Image (spheres, helix red, strand yellow):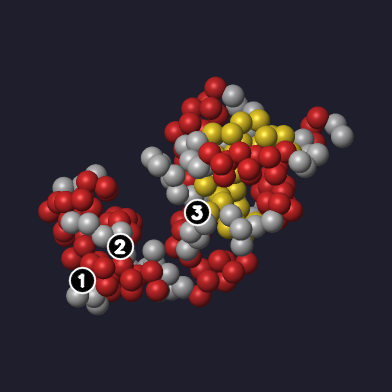
Amino acid sequence: MSADTVIRVVVVDDESLVASSLSTLLSLEDDLDVVATLGSGEEVLDWCQRHPVADVVVMDLQMGGIDGIETAESLPDGVNVLIVTSHGRPRQLKRALAGGVLGFVPKTSSAGEFATAVRTVHAGRRYLDPELAAAAIGVGESPLTERESQVLEVAGQGGSVEQIAAAVHLAAGTTRNYLSSAMGKTGASTRFEAWRIARERGWL
């Protein structure tokens, strides 16, 4: 196999065991060369600046710091992205596609599916989990703004308004306004109920 047919892959996941396992799986393929295994979006952005050789970045959706989709939007041109996640939701898929991500698959995919997804994304084509794609098609447009969705997602984990505000880096009063607006749009009487309704409708 000639060198120009080898796809250079960077694997990014903040769970080191997952990252190393995925790197090992992909390395078993003759045409895939894992050139780096990293732990955050910030790390891969820095790595790509210093080593402009990546063809495909295989990246976790939810990481500490910037998430996979935000990272994908900041990567250099010519680097295609495959998002892997254990928490796939229709809204996240839509957001990923809007951000230029070509591939979106669950972490439960087989080794063969991962490899096929990398090759497909490298070729500039989309590779999407069929069940998630079907769910995304069936979900109507969310009435929630990006900020309302962000605040509501954190609210679903519990905690006071002050704790939610700290998590999303907003003032408590601003956070309270976003929660109130989200509750109004979902017809909920509490912020947790608003989170539940938004999750059920595929808005989060």
Of helix, strand and loop, which one carries label 3?
helix
Q: Which mark is residue 190?
A: 1
Q: Residue at x 85, y 31 (%)?
A: 2
Whether residue 16 appears in this view of the structure is yes
Residue 55 percent location from the top left of the image: 66, 36
Q: Amino acid at mark 2?
A: Gly
Q: Quadrant of the N terminus?
A: top right
- Name the residue at 42% across, 69% down: 202
Which three-letter amino acid code belongs to the residue tagged 3?
Ala
Give me the C-alpha separation between circle 3 and circle 2: 22 Å
In the rendered image, which quarter is residue 147 located in?
bottom left
Q: Is residue 166 above or below residue 159?
A: above
Tag shown at residue 156: 2
Q: To which quarter of the image does residue 186 belong?
A: bottom left
Instruction: Measure how far apart labels 3 and 1 are at the Cα level.
Output: 29 Å
Where does the image place residue 18, in percent across and percent down from the top left?
Answer: 57, 44
Residue highlighted by disc 3: 96
Q: Neighbour class for label 2 at 10 Å: few (<14), some, many (≥20)?
A: some
Q: Is residue 137 left or right of residue 5?
A: left
